[in-house]
């Protein structure tokens, strides 16, 4: 049998089981079955004994003999079969409700069996329902196997005679044809990392001779998975670099230089300077820039975006900035207008709530090139927004925009505009290394000077009076305060009720006119939201009671306290974003996480992480550990979730190693002419178009 052969021809399979394998596990060929790895092993040299069973034993294997078979009729055509199974240390009752006839014929006294199943206690006696069973040493050819593989099976598979022991017999047969498997990794990589050959690793993953060999097999198979994931991404990356045509922004001109020397409100941090340099190199390279800018909240991404846009203007192009919410777009617009005052740059705001007549004028100005910089929301994407010459697109808080939306912006100019994507929340390093293997990545890893890390506390309801008196002290000292409520209910109405109840409580502690309170939530119109935001920003109100509409980007440096109500309902990255709203000025800021008393393990861990660190990268790592990659936005098409053996969470060293190896290979041999196996893989890879989904 050859690896690519149809599984139906494998001895012990046949048409009906082949069908089940296909429908339940998507396994159709011999090599696919070989890549169906055991999830655990049973050590035959130390099998469980009946005497040692506990309620927590889980799946166990026992060796022993049967006696005392009994059949009870339980209805027409139905019977219950029980048999005593003893291993010398005790007796457990085996029970069958189905397939009893087959079992009856198979079971023989005085024969040693190996059984596999989950023991339970029933009427004070150990029992095992529908165990898997085989004659010890009778049916296996590999007599000296120390570890028995255990495979995940479904109910339907078991009913078709494809339980874990049956699968083990199939993989055992398959091991015979393994020698014919081709190696997939380059020999020098194998040598460098001392990797097992593919055929050996596959044999050992099903039938390891020792723990050591099993570890080596796992490492090899993980390496392979991650290696090809990297190859997919990095191939896409280098293909894009080779084929993309970008406009060349060769010069740094008056806009940039005048802004830099006369308008810069504060010296740039080293990290900001580095990123601007990286962008500038991209812009004059002749290739389209596709750069991801990662920086923690408050690291000053907006200023970097603005200066990059000036580079586009210096070369006669227009630039636009797309933000996920109207509040944010409006805020960016105000920041830009303030910073660019006196530079004769046309800046416009284009959001849904702009009046129709104004929209028309703004669009005409954009088309005519009178407007140099446009800031907006999704409204920018609409077909009737035409640019005279769009040279640079900046996308803020990247994850909120879908792929299609972004690609629409590309289409607004030929050659397509350069793209700078700014993330709101750092991405764990391992993920960034895989997911963004195809993007160029810049990191701002330095906060502006003079920032004090926000101090974070966890409080429960009984201490609310203390929390509120603390807020009072801060407000009396001239500071401002956020109080944020999560969206808990499905219905906006109910959420609003929580918010309003909260507002009542706040108002009773902070009576007007001495204290002024703003409230912002999703139910308000854009105008109303902007009005409330402005009052807060201008210091006319002391407290901002809000739902998470203020989560991203809002910048009010005088605000020093962030109270997050029902904090257990927020995810880590959201908590981090919210906390990032304070600590933006020179004063010490605080974040107070209010929760109920009893918290689940993961809630506790989230709160603990928040209190322990303000580093967005560490928080991202913790988030990935707590939630697993499955719940992280944007990963669904990444291939990361399809990994069979490797884990993006636990295998960081391997992620790093494979990334470097693939990088070196592609750098030395971009067309993979010296690596025919890898070239072949790329040719058939289903992830070929991956990069287009991402940027
Ligand atoms: P984010 O990266 O979260 O988008 P912002 O761009 O909103 O951060 O910047 C956060 C705050 O830091 C703003 O108030 C901004 O004016 C200020 N800021 C940005 N760069 C510097 C700098 N180099 N020195 C001092 N303050 C800065
Ligand atoms: Mg921002």
Image: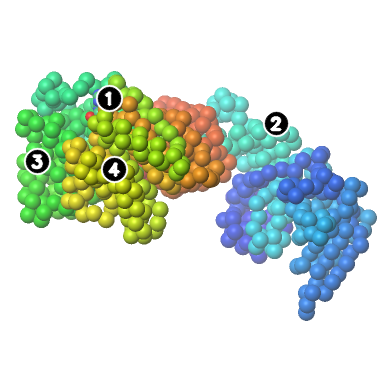
The furthest residue to the right: 110
- Relative height, residue 560 to residue 511 (above, below): above
- Assess disc 2: are there few (<14), some (14-19) or many (≥20) residues with their C-alpha within 10 Å of its C-alpha: few
Q: Is residue 121 left or right of residue 390?
A: right
Mark 3 to mark 2 CA distance (whole Å): 67 Å
Q: Which mark is residue 371?
A: 3
Identify whether 305 is placed above or below 63: above
* Mark closest to the chain's N terminus, 4 or 2: 2
Q: Quadrant of the C terminus?
A: top left
Q: Measured from the top left, where is residue 426 in percent x and y?
A: 38, 35
Cα distance between the residues tagged 1 and 3:
35 Å
| Distance of label 1 from label 2 (alpha carbons) | 56 Å
Residue that mark 1 sits on = 586
Q: Residues within 10 Å of mark 1 (few under 14, many from 20)?
A: few
Q: Residue at x 75, y 67 (%)?
A: 98
Who comes first in sequence, dot 1 or dot 2? Answer: 2
Q: Earlier in the sequence, mark 4 or mark 1?
A: 4
Q: What residue is disc 2 on?
A: 212
Q: Indicate which label's residue lies in the foreground, 3 or 2.
A: 3
Q: Secondary structure at mark 4?
A: loop
Disc 2, SS: helix
Q: Which residue shows up at 89% across the image and 64% down it?
A: 69
CB at disc 4 and ligand 1 closer than 8 Å: no
Mark 4 surroundings within 10 Å by alpha-carbon count, few (fewer than 14), some (14 through 19), many (20 or more): some
Q: Ligand 1, what quadrant?
A: top left
Mark 4–mark 2 distance (CA, rounded to whole Å): 66 Å
Left-right relation of 113 to 587: right
Corner quadrant of residue 683:
top left
């Amino acid at each position: 049998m050859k690896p690519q052969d149809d599984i139906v021809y494998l001895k012990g399979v046949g048409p009906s089981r082949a069908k089940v394998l296909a429908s339940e596990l998507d396994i159709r060929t011999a090599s696919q079955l070989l890549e169906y790895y055991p999830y655990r092993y049973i050590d035959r040299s130390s099998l469980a004994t009946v005497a040692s069973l506990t309620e927590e034993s889980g799946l166990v294997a026992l060796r022993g003999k049967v006696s005392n078979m009994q059949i009870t009729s339980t209805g027409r055509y139905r019977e219950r079969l029980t048999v005593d199974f003893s291993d010398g240390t005790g007796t457990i009752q085996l029970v069958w409700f189905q397939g009893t006839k087959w079992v009856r014929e198979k079971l023989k006294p005085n024969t040693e069996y190996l059984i596999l199943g989950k023991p339970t206690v029933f009427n004070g006696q150990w029992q095992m329902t529908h165990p898997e069973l085989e004659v010890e040493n009778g049916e296996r050819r590999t007599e000296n196997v120390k570890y028995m593989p255990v495979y995940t099976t479904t109910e339907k598979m078991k009913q078709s005679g494809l339980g874990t022991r049956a699968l083990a017999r199939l993989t055992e047969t398959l091991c015979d044809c393994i020698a014919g498997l081709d190696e997939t990794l380059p020999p020098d990589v194998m040598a460098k990392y001392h990797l097992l050959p593919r055929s050996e690793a596959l044999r050992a993953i099903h039938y390891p001779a020792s723990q050591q060999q099993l570890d080596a097999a796992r490492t090899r198979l993980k390496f392979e998975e991650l290696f090809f994931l990297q190859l997919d991404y990095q191939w896409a990356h280098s293909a894009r670099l080779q084929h993309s045509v970008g406009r060349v922004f060769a010069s740094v001109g008056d806009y940039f230089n005048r802004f830099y020397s006369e308008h810069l409100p504060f010296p740039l941090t080293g990290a900001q300077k580095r990123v601007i340099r990286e962008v500038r190199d991209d812009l004059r390279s002749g290739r389209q820039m596709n750069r991801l800018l990662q920086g923690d909240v408050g690291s000053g991404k907006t200023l970097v975006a603005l200066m990059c846009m000036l580079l586009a203007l210096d070369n006669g192009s227009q630039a636009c900035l797309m933000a996920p919410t109207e509040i944010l777009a409006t805020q960016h617009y105000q920041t830009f207008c303030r910073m660019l005052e006196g530079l004769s740059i046309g800046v416009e705001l284009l959001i849904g709530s702009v009046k129709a007549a104004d929209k028309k004028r703004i669009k005409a100005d954009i088309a005519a090139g009178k407007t140099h910089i446009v800031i907006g929301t999704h409204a920018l994407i609409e077909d009737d927004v035409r640019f005279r010459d769009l040279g640079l697109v900046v996308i803020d808080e990247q994850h909120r925009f879908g792929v299609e939306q972004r690609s629409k912006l590309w289409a607004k100019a030929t050659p397509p505009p350069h793209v700078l994507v700014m993330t709101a929340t750092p991405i764990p390093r391992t993920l960034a290394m895989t997911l963004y293997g195809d993007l160029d990545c810049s990191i701002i890893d330095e906060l502006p000077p003079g920032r004090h890390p926000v101090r974070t506390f966890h409080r429960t309801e009984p201490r609310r009076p203390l929390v509120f008196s603390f807020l009072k002290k801060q407000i009396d000292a001239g500071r401002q305060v956020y109080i944020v409520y999560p969206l808990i209910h499905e219905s906006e109405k109910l959420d609003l009720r929580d918010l309003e109840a909260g507002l009542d409580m706040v108002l009773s502690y902070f009576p007007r006119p001495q204290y002024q309170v703003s409230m912002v939530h999703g139910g308000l119109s854009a105008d109303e939201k902007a009005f409330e935001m402005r009052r807060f920003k201008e210091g006319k109100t002391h407290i901002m009671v809000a739902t998470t509409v203020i989560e991203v980007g809002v910048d009010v440096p005088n605000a020093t306290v962030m109270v997050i109500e029902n904090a257990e309902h927020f995810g880590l990255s959201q908590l981090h974003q919210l906390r990032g709203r304070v600590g933006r000025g020179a004063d010490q800021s605080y974040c107070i996480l209010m929760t109920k008393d009893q918290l689940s393990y993961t809630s506790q861990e989230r709160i603990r992480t928040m209190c322990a660190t303000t580093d967005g990268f560490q928080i991202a790592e913790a988030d990935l550990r707590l939630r697993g990659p499955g719940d992280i936005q944007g990963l669904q098409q990444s291939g990361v979730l399809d990994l069979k053996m490797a884990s993006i969470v636990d295998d960081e060293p391997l992620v790093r190693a494979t990334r470097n190896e693939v990088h070196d290979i592609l750098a030395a041999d971009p067309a993979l002419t010296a690596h025919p196996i890898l070239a072949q893989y790329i040719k058939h890879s289903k992830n070929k178009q991956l990069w287009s989904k991402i940027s």
